[in-house]
Amino acid sequence: MKTIRLLAALAFTTIAGFAQALDIAPWSAADFAQQQAAGKAVALHFHADWCPTCRAQQKVFDGWRGDAAVPGRLLVVDYDNARELRRQLGVRMQSTLIVFKGDKEVARLAGDTDPAKLRAALEAAR
């Protein structure tokens, strides 16, 4: 009986760890609002396909996809088509990362490709 409880606890911990792993998805206002309302870590990556800095950032983020050590959800915003959102959030350049914990902004980087800085920004929402 004790072994079964231990295995169940281990399975729950493993499942919970995967639920907290970095998840990357395209921008959706509804998804963003849902993450914020739940008080979860959510980041916006203002990305342009033509931007080499954005591509370098995306490569770093893709390497962390599913990594339980990197928290939250990363929503990729099409920089060229999100003018109103850019205006609302004061985004002036592609390759901007804004990290929220619920509805509070906790970190912002622009034009940075250093994995340590990108990770620190995402971890600011813990």
Image (cartoon, grey):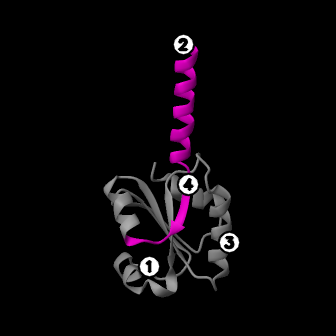
Q: Can you see residue 22?
A: yes
Decide which of tag 2 and tag 1 comes sooner along the chain.
2
Q: Secondary structure at mark 3?
A: helix
Identity, as a three-letter code, of the amino acid under mark 2: Lys
Mark 1 and mark 3: Cα distance apart in space: 19 Å
Tell me the amino acid under the disc marked 4. Leu
Residue 2 badge: 2
Q: Give the percent coordinates (x, y) of residue 22.
A: 56, 54
Q: Which SS class for mark 1?
A: loop
Q: Which residues are magenta?
A: 1-29
Q: Is residue 105 magenta?
A: no
Q: Position of residue 57 (x, y in %)?
A: 63, 69
- Amino acid carrying label 3: it is Ala
Q: CA distance from mark 3 to mark 2?
A: 48 Å
Instruction: Give the Cα separation between the discs numbered 2 and 1.
Output: 54 Å
Kindly identify the amino acid type of the residue bearing the numbered disc 1.
Val
Mark 4 or mark 3, whichever is nearer to me: 4
User: Whole-percent x and y of residue 27?
Assistant: 47, 72
Residue occupied by mark 1? 91
Residue 56, which numbered label? 3
Distance from disc 4 to disc 2, alpha carbons, whole Å, reads 33 Å
Q: Please name the residue that numbered disc 4 is placed on.
A: 22
The mark closer to the camera, 4 or 2, is 2
Q: Can the viewer see residue 104?
A: no
Q: Quadrant of residue 102?
A: bottom left
At mark 2, the secondary structure is helix
Mark 1 or mark 3: whose residue is earlier in sequence:
3
